[in-house]
Amino acid sequence: MSRLGTNENTFLFLGDTRWFHHPMTYDAARPLRVIQWTTGNVGRRSLHAILSRPDMELVGVFAHGADKVGVDAAELADFPEPSGVLATDDVDGLIALAPDACVYNPLWSSTDDLVRLLEAGINVCTTAGWITGTKLDPAERARIEDACKRGESSIFGSGAHPGMTNIVALTLTASCASIKHVRITESVDCSTYASAETQAAMGFGRDPATPGLAESVRRESEVFAESVGMMADAMKVTLDRIDFDVTFTAATGNTDLGFMEIPAGTVGSVYGYHRGWVGDHNLISVGFNWTMGDHVVPPKPLKHGHDIQVFGAPNMRTVIHCLPHEEWDEEGFMGLGMIYTAMPVTNAVPTVVAAAPGIVTLADLPVVTGRPTLIPRATDADTSRGQG
């Protein structure tokens, strides 16, 4: 990865075999041994996917809550068949299992935990606010890099946004003869994301005039800045700086969301971007147009999805909508967003295990895809019955 303000670029092209010589050799014919770290909103979706995949074997589950310790992973993931794997809070015991990878889904990451996993040779795929790790103190990031080197392991971070949206944006740029600006906006009503802690950290329900609120939101959303840097590296551009701007809009009435309240006069809309600049030109903007509650008008109308725009020759635009599938039987759509967040990381496990040691990003890895649900082929008898 290039560092801000330098010319050190190491973008590896799709098909570059250097990314497939991980020193932890394994037999591709056997399933990858995987542990799941936490089973909350995102983690239980990852856990369900691991249990569903024949190329992965769940060997352990870490649980924060004492009420989950000793519970079968299948119960925690709402999986139909018992797994025989019981959740534990014994980190040493999980490391001793010598898994190939850990799908790491806590709300906030711990450098100490990551170092323990990586130095033990366990590859980490995470949704916990990680793209490149540059938001960390340099000494902390160096600990991660050193752990990867000593354990000959890799760490990879992604999700829905940032993550999948950045890959779609970069793909759209391939259709352009020239590019002036790339803008990604998560444009949604966040009211269905029932996490008061997360929403308050982003300013919702607080006085818009709170001293330091803009800086607090910048820090809480700094992983978006990491994605700006990653995109610049992929496009072989050296940024001069990354900055942040945000607009808070107050709610005009009271809303009780059940898990938190948005009183009139407090923040009901957060509209902000982390922007990457080349000189005085804003090349990349990654941000959000978020609302909560029924009584706020945001600066821009909601798109109810991820609005991805490339301004160039030609202009390109797409809006990603995460929609319920035929079998969806959960109340509301929050669960869909959790699947959308979890899968870019869970599906990347085989590729990350095969990657060279170190911090790897979306710009480094080959295309990560999901696995089709196979439909049995029709037999000759079935075909003949359908003929007149």
Image: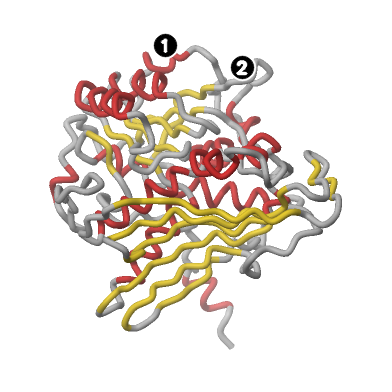
For residue 346, what is the image quadrant? top left
User: How many numbered callouts?
Assistant: 2
Q: Residues within 10 Å of mark 1 (few under 14, many from 20)?
A: few
The residue positioned 49% from the left and 56% from the top of the image is: 273
List the single residue furthest toward the bottom: 388
Q: Indicate the position of residue 56 as horizontal and vertical percent values.
A: 40, 37
Q: In the structure shown, which secondary structural element does the residue marked by tag 2 occupy?
A: loop
Q: Are marks 2 and 1 in contact (CB under 8 Å)?
A: no
Residue depicted at 60% across the width and 30% down the height: 82
User: Residue 108: image x %, image y %?
Assistant: 51, 31
Between 358 and 22, the one lying in front of the other is 358
Give the alpha-carbon distance from disc 2 to disc 1, as whole Å: 15 Å
Between 194 and 371, the one lying in front of the other is 194
Q: Amino acid at mark 2?
A: Val
At a point 74% along the width and 54% down the height, the residue shown is 250
Where 58 sits versus 213, above or below?
above
Q: Which residue is mark 1?
A: 92
Disc number placed over residue 181 in the picture, else none: none
Image position of 66 (left or right of 183): right
At label 1, the amino acid type is: Asp
Q: Relative to 220, is 33 on the left or the right?
A: left
Callout 2: few (<14), some (14-19), or many (20+) C-alpha neighbours within 10 Å? some
Q: Position of residue 381 (x, y in %)?
A: 52, 71
Residue tagged by mark 2? 69
**Residue 235, percent from left and from top:** 25, 61
Quarter of the figure that contains the N terminus: top left
In what quadrant of the picture does the C terminus appear? bottom right
In the image, taking residue 149 as reference, residue 374 lies left or right, namely right
